Image: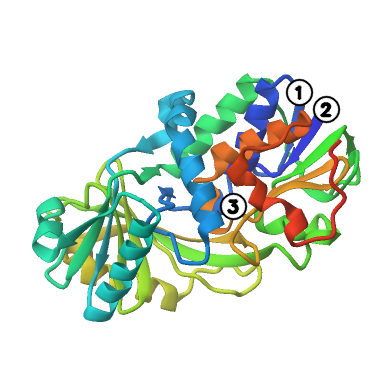
Amino acid sequence: MKVAVVGGGVVGLSVAWAAAEAGHQVVLIDAAPGSGASWVAGGMLAPVTEAWPGEEHVLALGSASLDRWPDFAARLEKKGGLREEGTLAVAVDAADREELDGVADYLARLGREVRRLTAREVRRLEPTLGMSVRSGLSVPGDLAVDNRVLLASLRKAATDAGAQPIAVAARSVSAGEVLLVNGSTVACDAVVLAAGARSGGLYEGLAKVVRPVKGEILRLKARPGALDPPTRTVRALVEGRHVYLVPREGRGLVLGATQYETGFDTDVTVAGVRDLLRDAERVLPGIGEYAVVECAAGLRPGSPDNLPLLGWLEPGVLAATGHHRNGILLAPITAEAVVDLLAGREPPEPARAADPARLLDVTNGGG
């Protein structure tokens, strides 16, 4: 089959790589592949510490994809930037600790491995964390990845497998055709719509289903004489607000992330930067001595129930979008599911809950 993958973020690149390796003739359509939300992301692979009651399908899908990540990374140059130190979730005040305890209880009922930590045990693991941290959870199975290393590795892998890039943005998609903004068209047997938050503007049926959710992040670096960043990902609750600190090579640190429903606005606001730094300093007091390397905002592709849309929208048009905060985490299982669907097979069992039919009146059946 000739397969047109629309969108060159982590999901689109992973799909293009997998589809090309499966023997399809693949074109990857994106004016700036490797940009957008995937470029801004923190790179956490943390389905357990992001789990919430009522989102069992999200947890199951994320956990199944996390299981695939070590092999997925092993086949990429530089292991795709995978980090295996684990995740530490921490709480600052009594209410935060209560919420964290609720998450731990929920995960224990599901049989997930989580170890409760006292404040002293938290600081034994990460000595640079502040005295305001009251308790924590150790989640050794959660991983992280350097998103920018990953994007470069995926682009190379997709190209090496035979995927052909088309550096023009899409205007719309339909069965058998992608219309480009320059007025030309790309004919194909199947379209895979993986354009993230922009997907709703390319296919009318998704206009009210996939929405942009803004997130601001800061990239920092410890200057000479400053305390080192944590050695593992730290997810913190600070007076009910969520903040994460993800280490990078070279004493770097990604700090995020705000969350707003503001349409396609990608300005970084003073308030967003202030809030991130204020909360991070409660957790990591030495962060005031770090250099600010970059401020950026991305648009997560949200869905009504936080599950992606992964399946046929109509014969010849397949959705791989709506991954919200979990695009990087879900890349391996998304790519696997797309290849299965293109071949007329059932996708992996955890991915079946993400069928667009749960939200849309779609015609299933494939290309």
Labels 3, 1: front one: 1
State the image coordinates of residue 201 (x, y, percent, origin top left).
78, 60
Q: Measuring 67% from the left and 37% from the top, which residue is drawn there?
A: 347
Q: 106 or 158: nearer the eye?
A: 106
> Which of the 4 image quadrants contains residue 33?
top right
**Callout 2: 10 Å neighbours few (<14), some, many (20+)?**
some
Residues under numbered marks 1 and 2 in contact, where contact means CB atoms less than 8 Å apart: yes
Find disc 2 in the rendering and name its residue.
2
Q: Earlier in the sequence, mark 3 or mark 2?
A: 2
Give the position of the C terminus as an image quadrant: top right
Q: Measuring 22% from the left and 67% from the top, which residue is drawn there?
A: 283
State the image coordinates of residue 330 (x, y, percent, origin top left).
54, 45
Find disc 3 in the rendering and name its residue.
36
Q: Earlier in the sequence, mark 1 or mark 2?
A: 2
> Which of the 4 image quadrants contains residue 48?
bottom left
Q: Measuring 32% from the left and 73% from the top, which residue is drawn there?
A: 99
How far apart in space, not on screen, are marks 3 and 1 (Cα)? 26 Å
Which of the labelled discs sits on residue 69, or is there none? Answer: none
Q: Earlier in the sequence, mark 3 or mark 1?
A: 1
Q: Secondary structure at mark 1?
A: loop
Q: Secondary structure at mark 2?
A: strand
Q: Is residue 36 left or right of residue 236?
A: right
**Amino acid type for the residue under numbered disc 3:** Gly
Q: Measuring 58% from the left and 60% from the top, which residue is drawn there?
A: 300
How far apart in space, not on screen, are marks 1 and 2 (Cα)? 6 Å
